[in-house]
Image (cartoon, rainbow, N blue to C red):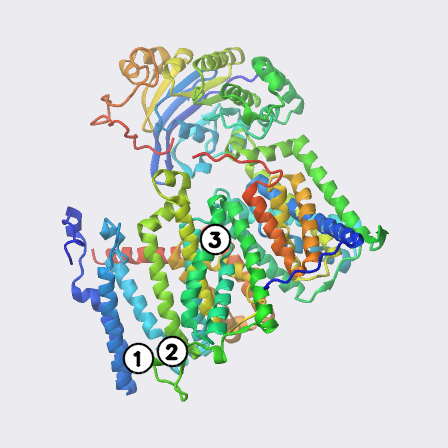
Amino acid sequence: MNANGLDLRIEGLTVIYGGVTALDAVSITVPSGGFVTVLGANGAGKTTLVRSITGLLYLHKGRVRRGSIVLGGESILGKKSPDIVSAGVAQVPEGRKLFPNLTVKENLLCGAASRSDISGIDESLEQNLELFPQLRPLLSQTAGLLSGGEQQMVAVGRALMSQPSLLICDELSLGLAPKIVHRLFELLTEINESRGTSILVIEQNASLALQHAADAYVLELGRVLIEGTADELRGNPMVQELYLGGGGEAHTSYAAIERPGHSRPLEHGQRPPAAES
Amino acid sequence: MTAVENPAPRQEEAQTYRPSTLQRFLPFIIAAAVPFILGSTTGDLNFWWKASITVVVLAVVARLAWKWTPRGELTHREDMRLWRTPSDRSWAALTMFGLLVLPFILASDFTPPMGFPWATWFAVVNLVLIFAMGAAAFNLLVGYSGQISLAHVAFLALGSIVGGIVGVQWSGGNMWYALPAAAVAGAVVGAISGLPALRLKHLYLLLATFGFHFVMMLVWREYLQEYFGFVGIRFKGENSPRIASWLHWLPGIDPDQNGEFVITGQFRWYWVLMPITVLSILFMVNVVRTREGRAFAAVRDRDVSASLLGINVARSKLFAFALSSAIVSMSGVLASFYIGSRGEDSFNVQTVLNYAIIIVVGGFSSIQGAIFGSAFFWFLPEWFKWAREELWFVRDIDFLSDYPSEIDLAIKGFLVVVILMFKPDGLAGLWRDFKSWFSRALARSNP
Amino acid sequence: MLLAFGNFTADPSVNLQLLIGGLALGAIYAVVALGFVLVYKSTDVLNLAHGEFLMLGAYFALTFLISENLNFFLGVFVLLLVMLAFGLLVHYGIMRRMVGQGFFAIVLITLGIATIIRALLLIFYGPTERARLDLLPQGSFEIGGATVRYVDIIIFGVVAACVLLFFVFFKYTRLGLHMRAVADDIEAAAAMGIDPDKVYAMTWAAAMVMAGVGGLLFGHVTGAIDRSIEAIGLRAFPAAVVGGLTSLGGSIVGGLVVGVIEQFANGHLGTKWREPVAFSVMFVVLLVRPTGLWGRKDLERV
């Protein structure tokens, strides 16, 4: 594959749903061929970020108020999703979002919807099956009947079918066994290194994401709270406390910890007042 | 106010507007005074005195009944009041005033300029009242409780059947027996027709209720053929409803030559239809505000979550069906007796469409909207007719005069589409916008 | 007894005639049901205006094939082209703005469209009824004492061909695949670069073309072409439901099943029983198996 990664520059992005601000002046940069992760809890605005990049906000009645999204020097803000996919952005949506009634093969082919080179599609399909050999016997299986791990592989494969310059993975680890998640992250790194595809990973599982990514951002309540290289973040005591659970485990309670910008910690069970994730 | 009704005053409550007793009764006093003022100019003082006193007594009784009605689960009562703000209350008073004065204006021999169709308006107003009642009940079911149903015309037919059996065959024109009978029959059949709702949703429920519509149409045709033949049921003439002789002492009831008081003519019908419609609509508005009504909304938004909250979803759905069907059946009885005859083709798919037009134009899921919608539905043809006959720039367009009813239909369909596309809350939404604009403008002018 | 039952007859030739009549009626239902299914499958819209679309098709067939007296194939081509344009108009003019609105609002807007079409047809064609179309072979032949019309066989063939065509289209073409993807999950489809807007427009166009075909065919078997033929839209509902609203093949089976049941109810019980029996069958199917005999099940997430 010859698609070189494109760089993504998001500057001062503010997104509202109705009257609720979901993202507030967020600036994130994915360098060409880079591997960036955005960490954050539920409701931090991660999914909104993905929707803004991929042009799907309108399906949720969201609206970009300010800011710019530039992919490889060209603004993709306000473009329709088919054009954005053609420009080189592919995504693995949160919760996989396979087409449940379509077969695995059909799902993969749908990923190539934006391509016009019919012959190249078969080639990509073959590449995918080399990447995920487990899928080969499942090709004519209905996607809705697969296991979670298999579904996630199909979802990643489907995204790769468009030969993206930028691959966005939203909550890859959600509901999957650690072993499978590890394997998927290794694959992402491989794709990143061998094909030069820029990768943006949105994650809750901070320890794993920080292992693989080069740069990282921590998003909270719609703002970028911390940014830096993955190593810097791993060393950051607040990140350790919040997202790495001290001992490197993810998903410990992040509540009851003093953070800048908040006069008091969130109480147990209290949701951050951001919009839907 | 009793102690039960007046909980310990809270901070914010102390600041809310509290009308004085005079203010509370002001609308009724005005309403009562107007006929008196009108009457004093026409000279028939005796009648107007009686009418005014009756209205005042009725108003006071209604107010007290309202005040002392047990509210059951109603907490946060400031929020749950029927007319929450002074502005709401003034609009309600104005509406009531208008409703009381309207028939006298319409019955007067006033002729507006440019041949504005005044005389035909009375019939239209009465039709609006009947349709508003049915459409509001339909909206209660479809809009508030989210149970998609196309069976409402089936219940109009049921109302006609009950009107035929109880009102014509058994009692020879006694609408007063037919109305409660129709309410009971409507509630029972409505609950039965709502049974599929326990299993089906959206599209499938819509189709199931539409199937019910056809079954009811079969029953209606069979009933007609069995007892009345193809001419249909006559609800007028000897079958017209009457006021019972023991009520003839009431003010405004002057028996005819034969000692009977037959409800005929637009003026008398108005005084029958208006209270029934107003009361049933107020009743529905009340239901929506109670625990039961909130359960409707919860079931509509997500019935699984509602059941987790402890709402009996099945009961709530069936109650919505029963309530709506009962009121639609009653409006079916009223329509039968008011229109005077019902035949084989009185109910068809176009009737279903008409109700859909009414609730869309008026404002989906708004009881107020049902009133706007039916007013619009019946007035549009009148205005259109007037415009064709009197307005010089419309009169000259032959095209419009050649196809009046078709263009009327096209306008309605076009409005349905446009309103759903651009203003989904319909005329009721426009009215809300106007009210908020008005109060903002008021606030701006005297800061 | 309030409801009078007709006589049951055991005469085989009468029953055969009813069966043939039922299959013919069922073929028509299948044409209409196919239109419903196309739209519902892809866009989740219950199109209550399909009967009116079909009426539009019948009237246009009248214009192009009888009044303008075009060559049959040219006329049909023009008819379908005009219907296709109307389908695009319906999507880009109206339905496009309704994506994401509530289910009932969309049902009501199709009723609004139905009203407009009905009114416009009345204005432009007038209320007078026209003779039915006679462009397809009009003869008939006898089989086992029952009459079979050529028209019915042609209708049956056309329906089968259409179902096959759509089946192949959905299964083996890229656009068909994309349409199925949008039907499954519109957001995921959009994320993959499929333009839902384009897919919906194609769907409406295809449904309109099917309505054109249906109007042309139904115009040959209806008593007369007038405004009452829109009722076929509602009468075909049981067929669509029994077959399953998401199944192309189901529409043909459902059409035939309901057509035969209706015709037998008509013959043995009386005409007035036709619709109630059909809708009762639909009702039972809804309660027992809401997605119809072949429809797919949709899972609901809380």
Q: Which mark is residue A196?
A: none
Determine the image quadrant of residue A139: top right
Q: Tell me if I can see residue B145 in this picture.
A: yes
Q: Amino acid at mark 1?
A: Leu
Q: Which mark is residue B250?
A: 1
Q: Position of residue B234 (x, y in %)?
A: 53, 75
Q: Position of residue B369 (x, y in %)?
A: 40, 58
Q: Amino acid at mark 2?
A: Ile
Q: Amino acid at mark 3?
A: Ile
Residue with the mark numbered 3: B192
Question: Between tags 3 and 1, which lies in front?
Answer: 3
Using the numbered discs, state the Cα–Cα distance from disc 3 to disc 1 in whole angstroms: 40 Å
Subunit of mark 1? B
Mark 1 crowdedness (10 Å alpha carbons): few <14, some 14-19, many ≥20: few
Q: SS class of the residue under badge 1?
A: loop
Q: Which mark is residue B243?
A: 2
Q: Position of residue B157 (x, y in %)?
A: 51, 63
Mark 2 crowdedness (10 Å alpha carbons): few <14, some 14-19, many ≥20: some
